[in-house]
Amino acid sequence: MYYNLIENKPDNEQVLLDSKGKIISKDKQDIVSVAEHTNGVIIAKKHIKSGSEALKKTNPNRAICHILDQEYDNETIFEHITALKDSFVIRLKLNCLSNLLYFKHFR
């Protein structure tokens, strides 16, 4: 499960939503805020980074494209792969919560 951080109006308190858009409990929010949790996105980011680093070890200019399925269609993964200077193809869910469009041109 991944969480989306939102700002709760009118008091500007930040709360976390689960992947279905529901506010998660205060206990879970406290655990997430101090990074004492793990989830599929955290694990995926570690694997994506270690794979990218391993492939670029012998050739730092190697072009890498990560191919992922619907489970990973969230902005955290998009931004993580982009920060690695890699590209990606991720099949999006029909009900994707993002209103942003991410794409890369392949050369």
Image (cartoon, rainbow, N blue to C red):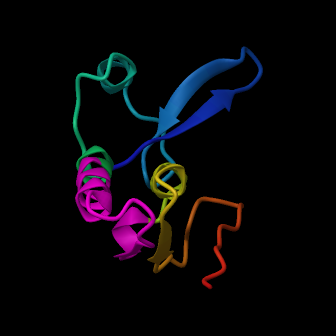
Q: Position of residue 45 (x, y in %)?
A: 32, 50
Q: Is 107 in front, or is 25?
A: 107
Seen in the picture, residue 68 relative to 72 is either above or below; the reply is: below
Q: Give the magenta range.
A: 46-72
Q: Is 17 in front, or is 80?
A: 80
Q: Position of residue 44 (x, y in %)?
A: 28, 55
Residue occupying the point 29% across, 54% down:
53
Seen in the picture, residue 94 relative to 79 is either above or below; the reply is: below
Decide whether residue 104 is among the magenta residues: no
Q: Position of residue 34 (x, y in %)?
A: 33, 16
Residue occupying the point 43% across, 53% down:
19
14 sits to left or right of 87: right
Q: Residue furthest bottom?
A: 107
Decide whether residue 64 is among the magenta residues: yes
Q: Position of residue 67 (x, y in %)?
A: 37, 78
Residue occupying the point 22% across, 58% down:
54
Q: Quadrant of the C terminus?
A: bottom right
Q: Is 36 in front, or is 61?
A: 61
Q: Quadrant of residue 58?
A: bottom left
Q: Residue furthest front?
A: 58
Q: Residue furthest right?
A: 10
Q: Is 87 in front, or is 60?
A: 60
Residue occupying the point 31% across, 26% down:
28
